[in-house]
Amino acid sequence: MKIKIGHLYPYELTLYGENGNLKALKYALEQKDIEVEITSINKEDDFDIKTYDFVYIGSGRPEFLEEIKERLEPYKKDIKDYINKDKVLLATGNSIAILELLRLYEIEYYDKRKVSDIEGTTSLCNGKIYGFQNTEYLIKTTKNILFSLEKGYGNNETCMEGYKKNNFYATSIIGPILARNDNLTSYLVDTLIKNKKEEE
């Protein structure tokens, strides 16, 4: 079995060591003797999302966000089709502002950055979830919540954070979140394996 991973714009969206998410996921897959192929998708590349089993987009410098949002606009329908087919897409940190283009959730901008350690839970897996927030963007929408927080900043001043639809997960939490949470990484590994077997 081979899992193909697409990493969106790693040279521009590379803050806070967020590539550690893919390192953690790759390691967990390889522990199950699964071959992993990671492809960097850069600004000069076409983005054929359907060729990937997992797509990741991480945090970047604020000056790049609007440019990348415009760059992904022509692929909006393909990305939504990918989500509707239960393929796995993870957005972390301020990249949630980029994927607002999908019109699945609203983003709220804060003049004063939200900085906090994170502690919470999720319906996806057992155990606590840990991470960090350092962002000027939070999701405003309070439906299809990803995390329940005991510590940290949630959507629209609540204790609920992030957004999920099928296997699309958007969160302001960094850490990197997969490197810090084996339970969440294991959930994604199991989901990828399940999807791959169903395709076969």
Image (cartoon, rainbow, N blue to C red):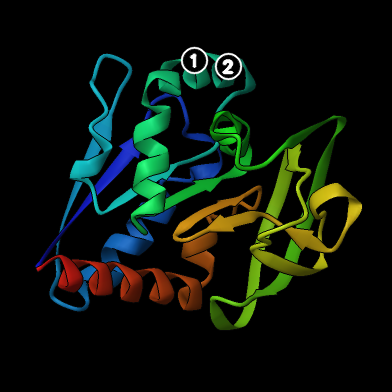
Residue 27 in the image: above or below residue 107: below
Instruction: Give coordinates of residue 199: x percent, y percent.
Output: 15, 65
Q: Name the residue: 78% across, 43% down.
A: 140
Quarter of the image for the N terminus: give it. Answer: bottom left
Q: Name the residue: 30% across, 71% down.
A: 28
Instruction: Give coordinates of residue 40: x percent, y percent.
Output: 26, 34
Q: Going by the image, does 105 lie left or right of 66? A: right
Residue 130 in the image: above or below residue 175: below
Instruction: Give coordinates of residue 187: x percent, y percent.
Output: 42, 75
| Closer to the camera in the image, 134 or 94 | 94
> Badge 2: few (under 14), some or many (20 or more) residues near its Cα, within 10 Å?
few
Q: What is the three-letter code of the residue carrying label 2?
A: Glu
Q: Quadrant of residue 66?
A: top right
Residue that numbered label 2 is attached to: 66
Q: Going by the image, does 185 lie left or right of 119? A: left
Q: Do the residues labelled 1 and 2 touch (CB within 8 Å)?
A: yes
> Badge 1: few (under 14), some or many (20 or more) residues near its Cα, within 10 Å?
few
Q: In which quarter of the image is residue 34?
A: bottom left
Alpha carbon of mark 1 to alpha carbon of mark 2: how far? Answer: 6 Å
Residue that numbered label 1 is attached to: 70
Element type at mark 2: helix
Q: In which quarter of the image is residue 96?
A: top right
Q: Name the residue: 29% across, 67% down.
A: 192
